[in-house]
Image (cartoon, helix red, strand yellow):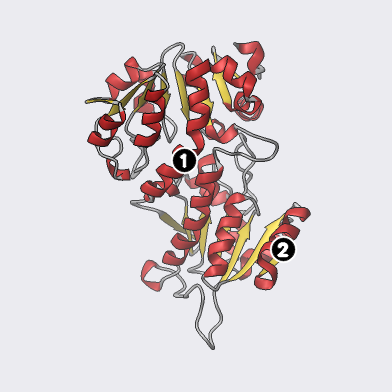
Amino acid sequence: MIIGVPKEIKAQEGRVSATPAVVHQLVGAGHTVLVEKDAGLLSTFTNEEYKEAGAEVLDSAAEVWEKADLIYKVKEPLEEEFKYFREGLLIYTYLHLASAPELTKALVDNKVTGIAYETVQIGRATPLLKPMSEVAGRMAIQEGALHLKQTQGGLGILLGGVPGVTPANVVVVGGGVVGTAAVRIAVGMGARVTVLDNNLPRLAELVDIFGNRIETLYSNSLNLANATKDADMVVSTVLIPGHKAPQLITEEMVKNMKEGSVIVDVAIDQGGSTDLTAKHGPTTHQDPVFVEHGVINYAVANIPGAVPRTSTQALSNATSGYLLQIANKGLDAATERFPELALGVNTINGKVTNKAVANDLGYDYVEYKDAK
């Protein structure tokens, strides 16, 4: 198989899908890997390293897209990349289609096979989303703490406080991978931390992990309203795989928060998990926040892209195994061997094969096995 690795073009996106080590593995298995020139530079991987690993380094994105059987990416294709779509092309990347109707239409109209990292599921686990969720959760606290500084327009609070001064009050909505990572950093920095989730066994697990360093609350609208009202920082992590994120934090709740407090919406790449971020849309690392009702809203859709060396290695480690199976055996055989991979196929042959995406965007749902 010919595998293409184009340079990411999303604003301030420094990740690349394949490390030289993964390229070496693919080439060793008999495949051709085409890497766009300078695709790995922001992750500190040079063109020479890719060549030494066996890749062909091409000068333009067009060459990579046009020659490849499968495009291996990090972020969803942007509109300027739609021109490269063609029938039979495989794209393996984060897609987030429920919040991207134009991309979905382009994939369907061009009969592209879109394989989304975020909907590959084993039970409740999302193994290709997990590594970036862990990065995003950790960074959410770092970015929130930055914007709590008075010089950034925030409350002027040090997250951990000092002896004789109370620490910041951090509220984490959702106790999954992102939420747990956020809690770990917030607790480590000495904040007072409250976690809300409607999964009581998960809340019990978090108490087992963190003990009395956290408080837990069952997530309902009243508890959420009371918790956010008292919060200095809110990290919203709610995610339903494949679906648009639910807007649990309403505008009314935000109106009742303290002026200079911070909301970090980690679910913005699935459409946003607060009324205001969903309405405003994603921000960028260059211009990461907007202020409404006196509250600072951080809504960067590619948070891990700011630490590309770490993120590239973590993502490539997780995604390369399935890629090798697809390249070696073909998609049909790979999905038979790994049924969770079939859940990652969101579009094929002009059909939408993920039920959540189909429901959210109004497409007829067709099972993967019936759409091949």
Q: Amino acid at mark 2?
A: Asp
**Vertical relation: 74 (above or below) 209:** above
**Vertical relation: 150 (above or below) 103:** below
- Badge 2 crowding class, 10 Å Cα cut-off, few under 14, some 14 to 19, many 20 or more, is few
- Badge 1 crowding class, 10 Å Cα cut-off, few under 14, some 14 to 19, many 20 or more, is many
Quarter of the image where one finds residue 5: top left
Q: Is 62 on the left or on the right of 371, as rendered?
A: left
- Which residue lies at the image location 55% right of the left edge and 46% below the top edge? 267
Q: Circle 2 is placed at which residue position? A: 208
Whether residue 322 is visible: yes
Q: In the rendering, at what x and y percent does residue 82 appear? A: 39, 22
SS of the residue under disc 1 = helix
Give residue 315's mark: 1
Q: In the rendering, at what x and y percent does residue 262 appear? A: 50, 63
241 or 232, which is in the foreground? 241
Marks 2 and 1, how far apart in space? 28 Å
Give residue 135's mark: none
Q: Amino acid at mark 1?
A: Leu
107 or 34, which is in the foreground? 34
Q: Residue furthest right?
A: 200
